Image (cartoon, rainbow, N blue to C red):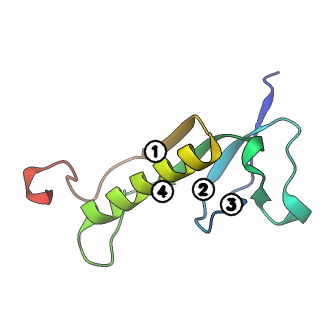
Amino acid sequence: NLPYKVSEPNVFILGSNVEMDALILNKDAKSIMNSGIYNPEDVVAMLEFKSNGIYSHQNNPFNKFIDTCKHFYKQLKDNKISVAAYITISEVADVFSSNNK
């Protein structure tokens, strides 16, 4: 009986134009007019899931990885959210290699 619940998939935080795979919400949180948009004060954590990592249109997965990190940081800072998780089963490239500086 935790005081939290998981949102439906593909949701937004009010004020952000970036879709999140799921949110951990306060138990009483409700989507604004059943839109899949939640008030920031109801969000406990942001979750992003990938089966094969991050893909990039420029064939540079590192750029997309950095963009995802920047988005998480902005949401954490702007909305005072304390947890963000990026979960993947495998990566399509070694985003931490020295070739991606």
Task: Name which residue type carries label 1.
Answer: Ile
Q: Are marks 2 and 3 in contact (CB under 8 Å)?
A: no
Tell me, yes or no, whether the two marked residues, 3 and 4, touch with CB atoms within 8 Å.
no
Please tell me which of labels 2 and 1 falls first in the chain: 2
Cβ atoms at labels 1 and 4 below 8 Å apart: no
Residue pictured at 84% horizontal, 35% vertical: 27
Mark 4: few, some, or many residues within 10 Å (few <14, many ≥20)?
some
- Residue at the disc numbered 3: 12
**Which residue position holds label 2?**
21
Which is in the foreground here, disc 2 or disc 3?
Answer: 3
Task: Check if mark 2's residue and mark 4's residue have beta carbons within 8 Å.
Answer: no
User: What is the CA distance from the residue labelled 3 to the residue labelled 4?
Assistant: 12 Å
Q: Position of residue 34 (x, y in %)?
A: 88, 63
Q: Could one spot residue 75 in this view of the protein?
A: yes
Which of the two discs, 2 and 4, labels the residue nearer the N terminus?
A: 2
Seen from the viewer's position, the closer of residues 61 and 32 is: 32
Q: Residue 71's mark?
A: 4
SS of the residue at dot 1?
strand
Q: Quadrant of residue 51?
A: bottom left
Going 22% across and 53% down the picture, which residue do you hit? 95
Q: Is residue 41 left or right of residue 22?
A: right
Q: Position of residue 100 (x, y in %)?
A: 15, 58
Disc 4 marks which amino acid?
His
Q: CA distance from mark 3 to mark 1?
A: 18 Å
Q: Is 85 displayed left or right of 92 in the figure?
A: right
| Residue picked out by circle 1 | 87
